[in-house]
Image (cartoon, coloured by chain):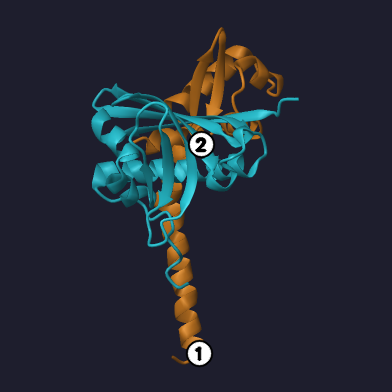
Chain colours: A orange, B cyan
Amino acid sequence: MHADKVFKALGDPTRRKLLDLLCERNGQTLGQLCENLDMARQSATQHLGILEAANLVSTVRRGREKLHFINPVPLHEVYERWVRKFERQRLSLLHDLKKELEGE
Amino acid sequence: MTKETTSFVYVTYVLSTPEKVFEAITKPDVARRYWGHENVSDWNPGSKWEHIRANDERTVELVGKVIEVSPPTRLVITWANASQASDPASYSRVTFEIEEYENMVRLTVTHDELEAGSGMANGVKQGWPAVLSSLKSFLETGRGIDLFAKPKSA
């Protein structure tokens, strides 16, 4: 459902950097995130908006602050959809090779 | 001295109803099908709940108290390793919020009051994304993800 938005959101180095920053420390404000980014708050807000639309970032209001949290659930779905499938194939190839070599 | 705490917020959108999502968390025979565990309680505020592995051993892995229940939109529980049940400091808190969102349900799981860097904090960081994508898959397709799946050739 969100796959296009997820891949589009990940297709930008600033947005990946934002996710890395949240991975290091979850629940940061825009101001805290901007300290580690070389860009105006307005651009950072736009990038965070794209991440939030892709459900890769969720936000929680705490008083006057808006805290940003990395939400890895869509990434897990990408992993389930793509990576795990290939891992299984690769492992079964190794299994076949082993059988072949051992002459079973 | 208070310990440094950490929190996580997970969001998933599920093509389902709030009632079904709430049941998927609180009904043992539903939870076991996508979580591999059952959450067992009478779900009254103040009652205890247990997270039980849905296999023959039926190991109680997590325990806690029910803090707040308003079906089908909100559930708040405390959460600790069964082995640390007697240590009040080991309890963290999990809040499930279920909102209707267009034709979907937005499920937000907030896990907070976790001790930063603890085994539990690292464990839930791995666990929740898998559990929530399995829940989504189960409610949308009738099939969860086998959370204990091993590679085919193993």
Q: How many marks?
A: 2
Horizontal arrangement in the rendering, residue B44 relative to residue B1 (left or right): left
Instruction: Determine the secondary structure under disc 2.
Output: strand
Determine the chain carrying the residue at label 1. A
Relative to A45, B42 lies left or right: left
* Direction bottom: furthest residue: A103
Residue found at x 34% / y 32%:
B43
- Chain to which mark 2 belongs: B
The answer to whether residue A27 is left or right of residue B129 is: right
Q: Position of residue B78 (x, y in %)?
A: 49, 32
Asked if labels 1 and 2 touch by Cβ distance under 8 angstroms, the answer is no
Query: What is the crowding at mark 1: few (fewer than 14 residues within 10 Å), some, or many (at least 20)?
Result: few
Please name the residue that numbered disc 1 is placed on. Answer: A102
Residue B37: x and y, percent? 39, 50
- Quarter of the picture holding the N terminus of chain A: top left
User: Regarding mark 1 in the picture, which secondary structure is present there?
Assistant: loop
Report which residue position mark 2 lands on.
B79
State whether residue B8 is above or below residue A80.
above
Residue in front for this viewpoint, A65 or A5: A65
Distance CA(mark 2)–CA(mark 1): 49 Å
Three-letter amino acid code at disc 2?
Trp
The residue drawn where x is 46% and y is 86% is A100
Q: Position of residue A53 (x, y in %)?
A: 42, 25
The single residue placed furthest to the top in the displayed view is: A64
Answer whether residue A76 is visible to the viewer in this image. no
Q: Residue at x 68, y 23 (%)?
A: A37
Q: Are marks 2 and 1 on the same chain?
A: no
Q: Position of residue A35 (x, y in %)?
A: 71, 19
Residue in view at x 55 percent, y 23 percent: A68
